[in-house]
Image: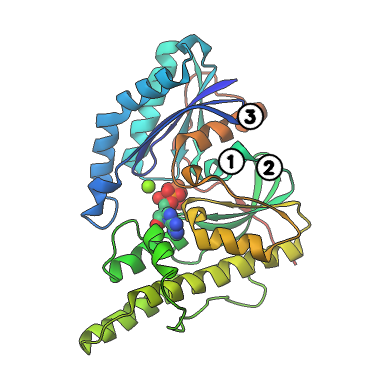
């Protein structure tokens, strides 16, 4: 089954064609990072406008690269949320128009479920599994019972981990997005700033990153007032060590409590080299699945991968209606 997938939830305009949820026949990702960099973050209105400008071209290129005719496309899938509403609507309207004009069925895919299925492109998810979903807007530990049957074990009580990376980077005068830069600079520094680790109450699988972020901001602020230098590389190493300690320890705790075969790390922060290495070092008794770097941050291939399994389970709505925008997808599950 060939699925044409569209992703436009934030600042990547992306269209991919994916066969049977695994084989990426074509994949175009047009990043707007350079446009938003000067503002230190994504400006929603500018993001939507750029999706409008580039969407048709990205569609055409993805279809051309796949070497398929439009007749050979079996299903259209589009990110339905969560994300920036103006950005989402551009992708949803383009996908709906394409499906309607060509007599194709269409389904709406949850962006977070897409991030998880990125791990199924080069590997195969086996259930039950645990997923640590770490992205610009989300930080969740999930229990994956079966395809499309996911429960939330823990989530962030305040900032998402990617958001914390980006804000700390901005405080240190580094470029947007801050995650990859902090990851790189942390290799050049040492964990000497003694930043807090927020474990919350005993056995909690929830996260909190706002205290950590504030403590970096306070240190930088105090140093500025006293005209002291911040050791940027050491601060990056300290921040990253604090984040990784908590992410890795809570993922290990979830593994102790639930009997699973695999641990999946997904979302933009799964591109973090430190996280990739530490998870593999510290969790030896489970199979670790981490998407290839190009499938960690936003892309349409992951939406095409998720759509295949979603369609097997739920089919498509008969008359193009997508049922509005979707936000969070997961019920919580309490474990002892
Ligand atoms: P969401 O998926 O929650 O809606 P989003 O789509 O904006 O949010 P992603 O594209 O999944 O987020 O990820 C972007 C985030 O990943 C940014 O915050 C960025 O700083 C972070 N990131 C990317 N690479 C790295 C890295 N190497 N280390 C840490 N963070 C990273
Ligand atoms: Mg992005
Ligand atoms: Fe994302």
Question: Whole-percent x and y of residue 60?
Answer: 36, 20
Question: Whole-percent x and y of residue 262?
Answer: 71, 51
Which badge, 2 or 3, is on the more N-terminal residue? Answer: 2
Residue 239, picture quadrant: bottom left
User: What is the distance, in whole Å, between disc 1 and disc 3 at their CAs?
Assistant: 16 Å
Judging by the rendered image, the residue that carries numbered circle 3 is: 314
Q: Secondary structure at mark 1?
A: helix
Q: Is residue 42 left or right of residue 188?
A: left
As displayed, is residue 202 above or below residue 31? below
Label 1 neighbourhood size at 10 Å, few (<14), some (14-19), many (20+)?
many
Is label 2 in contact with label 3 (beta carbons under 8 Å)? Answer: no
Is label 2 in contact with label 1 (beta carbons under 8 Å)? Answer: yes
Report the residue at 45% width, 39% height from top.
Answer: 299
User: What is the distance, in whole Å, between disc 2 and disc 1 at their CAs?
Assistant: 8 Å
Which badge, 1 or 3, is on the more N-terminal residue? Answer: 1
Quadrant location, the N terminus:
top right
* Residue 33: image tag: none
Report the residue at 22% width, 90% height from top.
Answer: 226
Q: Secondary structure at mark 2?
A: loop
* Residue 125: image tag: 2
Q: Is residue 235 left or right of residue 129?
A: left
Q: Secondary structure at mark 3?
A: helix
Question: Whole-percent x and y of residue 264?
Answer: 63, 51
As displayed, is residue 72 above or below residue 232? above
Judging by the rendered image, the residue that carries numbered circle 1 is: 117
Question: Whole-percent x and y of residue 296?
Answer: 49, 47
User: What is the distance, in whole Å, between disc 2 and disc 3 at their CAs?
Assistant: 19 Å
Q: Is mark 2 within 8 Å of ligand 1?
A: no
């Amino acid at each position: 089954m060939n699925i044409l997938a569209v992703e436009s939830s934030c600042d990547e305009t992306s269209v991919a064609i994916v066969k049977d949820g695994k084989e990426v026949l074509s994949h175009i990702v047009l990043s707007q990072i350079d446009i938003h960099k000067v503002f230190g973050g994504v400006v929603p209105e500018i993001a939507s406008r750029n999706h409008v400008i580039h969407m048709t071209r990205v569609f055409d290129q993805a279809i051309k690269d796949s070497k398929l005719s439009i007749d050979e496309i079996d299903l259209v899938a589009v990110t339905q949320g969560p994300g920036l509403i103006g950005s989402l609507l551009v992708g949803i309207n383009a996908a709906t128009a394409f499906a309607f004009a060509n007599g194709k069925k269409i389904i709406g895919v949850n962006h977070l479920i897409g991030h998880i299925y990125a791990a199924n492109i080069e590997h195969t998810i086996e259930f039950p599994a645990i997923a640590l979903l770490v992205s610009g807007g989300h930080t969740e530990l999930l229990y994956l019972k079966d395809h499309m049957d996911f429960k939330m074990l823990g989530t962030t009580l305040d900032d998402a981990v990617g958001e914390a990376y980006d804000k700390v980077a901005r405080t240190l005068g580094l470029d947007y997005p801050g995650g990859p830069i902090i990851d790189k600079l942390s290799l050049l520094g040492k964990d000497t700033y003694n930043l807090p680790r927020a474990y919350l109450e005993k056995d909690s699988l929830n996260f909190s990153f706002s205290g950590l972020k504030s403590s970096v901001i306070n240190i930088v602020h105090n140093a500025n007032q006293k005209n002291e230098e911040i050791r940027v590389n050491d601060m990056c190493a300290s921040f990253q060590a604090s984040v990784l300690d908590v992410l890795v320890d809570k993922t290990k705790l979830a593994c102790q409590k639930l009997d699973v075969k695999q641990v999946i790390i997904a979302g933009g922060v799964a591109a973090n080299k430190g996280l990739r290495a530490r998870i593999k070092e510290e969790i030896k008794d489970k199979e670790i699945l981490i998407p290839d770097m190009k499938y960690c941050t936003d892309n349409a291939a992951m939406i095409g991968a998720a759509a295949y399994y979603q369609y097997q389970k739920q089919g498509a709505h008969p008359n193009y209606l997508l049922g509005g925008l979707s936000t969070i997808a997961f019920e919580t599950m309490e474990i002892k």
